[in-house]
Structure formats: structure tokens, C-alpha cells
Image (cartoon, grey):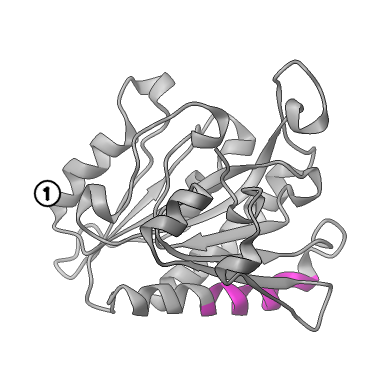
Amino acid sequence: MFDLIDECGKDLMQCGYETVELENFGVTSSKLFVDSKRKAKDLGFDQGHYFIINAPKLDFLMPEHRSILKEEFSDRLSFLLKENKVGKRSKVLFVGIGNPSIIADTFGVKCVEKIEIMPYSRKNRYFKIIPNTFSNTGINAYDMIRLLVGWCGVDLVMLFDSLATTNIGRLGCSVQFNDAGLTPGSAMNNFGLPINKDSLNVPCISVGVPMMISSKSLGQKKDVIFTEKDAEGKIDFLSEIVSEVVQELL
């Protein structure tokens, strides 16, 4: 199982995969619409719209990327919100997937922490939760989210998560957006339950950043999970931009 759709090992060009290189720093924007059950089965990914922003020079030029990434993130999320008929009056549940005690797994946690809500206002339309991991709570994130979707009457679930990659050069340098939801821990063989429109009956938009890589992807026999030494800095940087964009659009 793979987290990033362009690492699934299939010929995505035949499926309509497109990549555009932007003007600065080698940043690219890719998109793929998995529009049939057959295509979903072939790729191993659920139906939906997928966008990936790659910023290979983010390690060296982080501040310089801010305005470029913010514009790209805003464009992708705007499309997904419009496609799923989510507007300024919609109720939204923000979910930070991940283990708060492991730095590389805190992208989702940081995003949700930075999104401001107005819990004491009658006009509040935002709800947020950080479910932690099944190994720490004994409760599947899906079960928590399912209960809250019904109780809060939300129109959209927006998920944020740290992902796994098979390419060490993509750690903290790619961001994937989709409206297909996600399955927590799927790339690390820790299969949770799918969190998507089919399972919750509301649209599910997912934002993920690859922050972990298995040693097996690096040619090692022993399976150990690695991240990079500046993981915390990248997570803080990207989660700040994502949370800003989300609040501006919603």
C-alpha cells in the first residue's frame, strides 16, 4: 500500500496524470482524476481527485517557497471544496491524524492545532479533533469521526496526516490533496478503517505530507521507519501555510 498516488508503480500517464512545472524553484503541480472503479482497483487508490505539489528545493529555500506554496495550496483546495459543494456556511470537522508524541507523525496534529474555532459562538461551524493512534487509545479514528459526524451534523470532514514515501528526496517536500479520504497507517501496514465519503456519507478532503520512509525502501532488510533531522521545521512551516489557507477558504 502506498500513500502517494504517484508512487503506486503504475503507468499514470495512461490514466490521465498531468504534471506542470511552475516558474520558480522547480516546484511542480500534478493532478489525476480516478474516475472509475476499474481505475481505482488498478491503481489501488479510491476514486477521487488527487493533486500533488512537489517542492524539491524546500530544504534550502524554505521561506522563499511560502507565497508560491500558499497560492498552489489555495487553488487545489478551492477546487476540491467547489467540487464537493462545500461553502462558507458548511459545517466542517477538522481531524488531525497521527501520534502527537512522534515528531514525524505530527503534521496532522499541528494543522488542526493552528486552525481557530469559536466554540462559544452560536455561529460556530467548525469542530476539531485529534484522535491519536489506535495503539495509544485502543479506539479507531474512524469510530470517533463517525460518531462526531452524526452528532455535529457536519457537511465535510477535512483530514490532515503525515504520510509515508518510498523516495527519501520527497520527505517534507511534497503535499498531496485529495477528496478520496484516507486510511490511517495504511502505508506502514497498520491498517485502520477507511475514512471517506462511502464510509461516512459526507465528503472527505485529505491533506498529507510524506514525513516517513521505511528502511526497506532504502534497500535494507530490517524494517525501520526513518525521518529527516529537520522534520519538525518542515512540519511547522507547511502546517502553518495549510491552516492559513483552510481558514481563508472556509
Query: Magenta segment, which residues?
Result: 64-75
For the C terminus, which image quadrant?
Answer: bottom left
Q: In the image, what residue occupies the spot 69% across and 43% down?
A: 232
Does dot 1 land on a helix, a strand or a loop? Answer: helix
Q: Position of residue 170 (x, y in %)?
A: 75, 51
Quarter of the image holding residue 167? top right
For the N terminus, which image quadrant?
Answer: top right
Q: In the image, what residue occupies the spot 13% across and 58% down?
A: 153
Q: Is residue 135 visible?
A: yes
Q: Position of residue 223 (x, y in %)?
A: 70, 19
Q: Is residue 113 visible?
A: no
Is residue 65 part of the magenta span, yes or no?
A: yes
Is residue 89 part of the magenta span, yes or no?
A: no
Q: In the image, what residue occupies the spot 54% across and 68% down?
A: 32
Left or right of 71? Residue 129 is left
Give the residue type at disc 1: Trp
Quarter of the image holding residue 227? top right
Q: Position of residue 141 (x, y in %)?
A: 33, 35
Dominant secondary structure (helix, strand or loop) of the stretch shown in magenta: helix
Q: Nearer the viewer, residue 153 or 124?
A: 153
Q: Nearer the viewer, residue 94 or 117?
A: 94
Q: In the image, what residue occupies the spot 40% across and 59% down?
A: 47
Q: Position of residue 226 (x, y in %)?
A: 73, 30
Q: Nearer the viewer, residue 123 or 177?
A: 177
Identify residue for label 1: 151
Q: For the view shown, which residue lies furthest in the bottom direction?
A: 23
Label 1 packing within 10 angstroms: few (<14), some (14-19), many (20+): few
Q: Is residue 232 above or below residue 47?
A: above
